[in-house]
Image: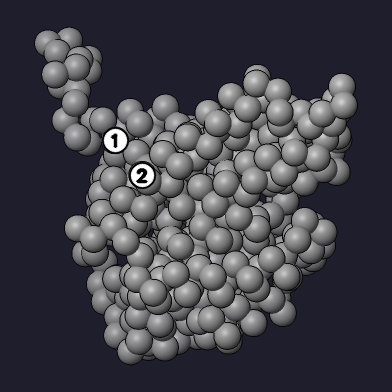
Amino acid sequence: MDAAFTAEQHEIRRTLRELLVTHCGPGEVRAAAGTAPGYDEALWHRLAGELGLPGIALPEAYGGVGCGTAELALACEEAGRALLPSPLLATSVLAAPLIARLGTEAQRAALLPRIAEGTLTAALAVPGGSLATALGLTGDNTGGQWAGGGRAGGIQARPDGGGGGGEGSWRLYGEAAQVLDGHSAGLLLVAAHTGGFPRSRTLLFLVSAASAAGLVRTRQTSMDCTRAPARVELRDTSAELLGADDTTDVAGALAEAGRTVAAVLAAEAVGAAESALDRTVAYAGEREQFGRPIGSFQAVKHRLADLYVQVQAARSAAYYAAWDPAAGGLALAQALEALRVTTSQAIQLHGGIGFTWEHEAHLYFKRAASDELLFGPVHRLRDHAARQAGLFAPDTAGRGVAV
């Protein structure tokens, strides 16, 4: 294993950082998050046109850059540093890999080039607000309970028997909450049940937001204004099955995608934590108490040093997970914990000004809280990773014991 980054990877990081430093300060972040789509569309198209950011991990055959998880993680680390409001996570990290893996050649050829050029955004909609479980991060997703288990609730799918829909045409009924970028995405990737309760199975469906009748999307209020969730309601909405048939192992595909998602999210959290720490260190060097900077006091030095060690340890775990996504769950747990601790300490060390609602430290603190609600909590990430690694075995009463 060569842990050193290549010159090309360093260039990706440098170029993206320079662009975001210029165009994505705290004021621009708040302004972009307050727009109807929840991000700066002009900046997104620039990132797509100049850097190929939406398609950085897509194959060149479909208009992508042809890079891998490491490059996507580096890009998301820089996006995390700036708290960039963008469709990058929902489109390029969550939806596009599933289309690339499960879609037919016709579906890939029709959708992936548009995603790569930034003209089409996508969102993954799973019912129940259980995205972490659906991706296999905090629990086993093979039972389908995260999607309603085939009983009442969730999203139900049935073949379109109305004629004219053609083979592969389906109808969806139900709703999903906490869908990242669900209110603005041009394409929805919807997890739904079909087959009735006895033969229930979860499949993925494509819904074109521009032409789908019976689709209602409502942007939800979020703690983190830089991530815009939505409630998606489907009322007999026409959809297309993702893939060639209904025998696809959707749970396995989601779990595989989840490992990469965890690695990329860990890098993004590390970027946010490092930025919050850098801003705190700078403030500690400027703010004076008793005629000297507060950063010169031993207690403050020790707290900042501890945060630095925690962030660097999380970075090492995130980079390892980018090389081996199987370690993504543990890396994400470590990164989310580092982000939570660093941002809470950042508010404390900023003193009175840090507690004001308008201060930029709150943007990072809210990102930490929001990420752990969406993809955690940390203790469940670690518990599931430990069980997958076989660290616990059931005793005679069926309880987990350490082995």
Q: Residues within 10 Å of mark 1 (few under 14, many from 20)?
A: many
- Residue 214 vs 401, above or below: the answer is below
Q: Secondary structure at mark 1?
A: helix
Element type at mark 2: helix
Q: Position of residue 41 (x, y in %)?
A: 70, 76
Residue at the location (72% across, 44% down)? 282
Q: Mark 1: which amino acid?
A: Ala
Front-most of residues 271 and 231:
271
Q: Earlier in the sequence, mark 1 or mark 2?
A: 2
Name the side, left or right, on which 351 lies relative to 152: right
Rendered position, 16 above or below 107: above
Look at 30% across and 80% down and name the residue there: 104
* 226 versus 285 height, above or below: below
Alpha carbons under labels 1 and 2: distance apart: 14 Å
**Disc 1 vs disc 2: which is toward the camera?**
2
**Residue at image coords 65%, 58%:** 82
Q: Residue at x 26, y 76 (%)?
A: 244
Q: Position of residue 101 (x, y in %)?
A: 29, 71
Residue 364 is at least partly visible in this image? no
The reply to whether residue 334 is visible in this rendering is yes
Instruction: Name the residue carrying label 1.
Output: 385
Label 2 neighbour load within 10 Å: few <14, some 14-19, many 20+: many
Farthest front residue? 291
Identify residue for label 2. Answer: 317
Up-down relation of residue 272 to residue 21 (above or below): above
Q: Which mark is residue 103?
A: none
Instruction: Give how far across and how far down residue 1 sits, in percent.
Output: 19, 58
